[in-house]
Image: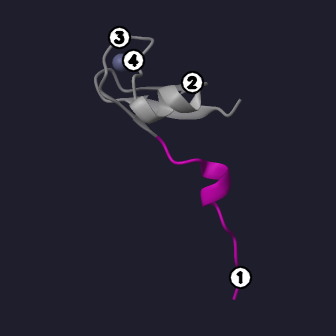
Amino acid sequence: MPHYEYHCDACDTTFNATLTLREHEEERLRCPQCGSEKVHQLVSTFSAVTSKKS
Ligand SMILES: [Zn+2]
């Protein structure tokens, strides 16, 4: 199961969540800290980092 990293805008907390594809598409995720739905997914760092030297 893939891990997703999320950030809560309400309490400024970053947390990881493992979701099924269905849950992920529906975006029904709540912050474990404050229960807010104001969370957004962070970009995966491992795939975003590209070190190309030209
Ligand atoms: Zn929160």
How packed is label 2: few (under 14 Cα within 10 Å), some, or many (20 or more)? Answer: some
Dot 2: element: strand
Q: Residue at x 69, y 71 (%)?
A: 51
How packed is label 4: few (under 14 Cα within 10 Å), some, or many (20 or more)? Answer: some
Q: Amino acid at mark 2?
A: Ala
Q: Residue at x 66, y 67 (%)?
A: 50
CA distance for labels 3 and 1: 43 Å
CA distance for labels 4 and 2: 10 Å
Asked if marks 1 and 4 touch (Cβ < 8 Å), the reply is no
CA distance for labels 1 and 4: 40 Å
The residue under label 1 is 53
The residue under label 2 is 17
Point out the frontmost of discs 1 and 2. 2
Q: Is mark 3 within 8 Å of ligand 1?
A: yes
CA distance for labels 3 and 2: 14 Å
- Vertical arrangement, residue 35 with respect to residue 18, above or below: above
- Vertical arrangement, residue 16 with respect to residue 31, above or below: below
- Lateral position of residue 44 relative to residue 1, left or right: left
The residue under label 4 is 30
Q: Point out the stretch of residues depicted in magenta.
A: 42-54
Q: Position of residue 12 (x, y in %)?
A: 36, 26
Residue 35: which disc?
3
Q: Position of residue 18 (x, y in %)?
A: 61, 24
Tell whether position 18 is magenta. Answer: no
CA distance for labels 3 and 4: 5 Å
CA distance for labels 1 and 2: 34 Å
